[in-house]
Amino acid sequence: MKRIDLVRLIEGLVGELSPEGREAWEEMEQVALLGPSEKDDHPSELLRIWEAQVTPENEAVLKALILLRIGLVAEYPAEDTSRREAREFRRLCAIKAAQVVDHAEGRPVDPDMTAEQAIARLSRSQDG
């Protein structure tokens, strides 16, 4: 799976969020971009945002966005990560994100979902 596939899915899913959900996502992204501080309160700040701002209507989409974002940036910390390993990790993150959305919507979760099915599922979510 290419990085651009995840970028497009992220952009589409952000559009599904309510204004409050979008604000929470933007704050979480900002915290993630800044990285851990000297006090190492990075995880607690993300948790504070989640607990204070995430509503049930936005929860599944935000979980999917987090998984896709992890897939997008996870290859950077490991200098020895091969392109194939990075593509595989992105593929797994997209599949998990689609499964989260399916579960939240009460749909059966396909344990054998392919990356192509995940992209189609998340894209349908954006269209519907």
Image (tube, rainbow, N blue to C red):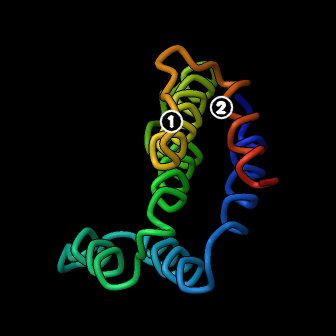
* Residue 80 higher or lower than 97, as above or below: above
Q: Are marks 2 and 1 in contact (CB under 8 Å)?
A: yes
Residue 29 % position (x, y): 51, 71
> Left or right: where does residue 88 sit relative to residue 70?
right
| Residue 80: x %, y % from top left | 48, 28
| Quarter in which the C terminus is drawn | bottom right
Q: Toward the viewer: 18 or 77? A: 18
Q: Quadrant of the N terminus?
A: top right
Looking at the rendered structure, the kind of residue marked 2 is Ala
Q: What residue appears at the point 52 percent right and 14 percent down from the top-left corner?
A: 112
Q: Which residue is mark 1?
A: 99
Q: Secondary structure at mark 1?
A: helix
The crowding category of the residue bearing disc 2, from other C-alpha atoms within 10 Å (few below 14, some 14 to 19, many at least 20), is many
- x, y (%) of residue 10? 67, 56
Residue that badge 2 annotates = 118
Quick one: which residue is furthest to the right in this view?
127
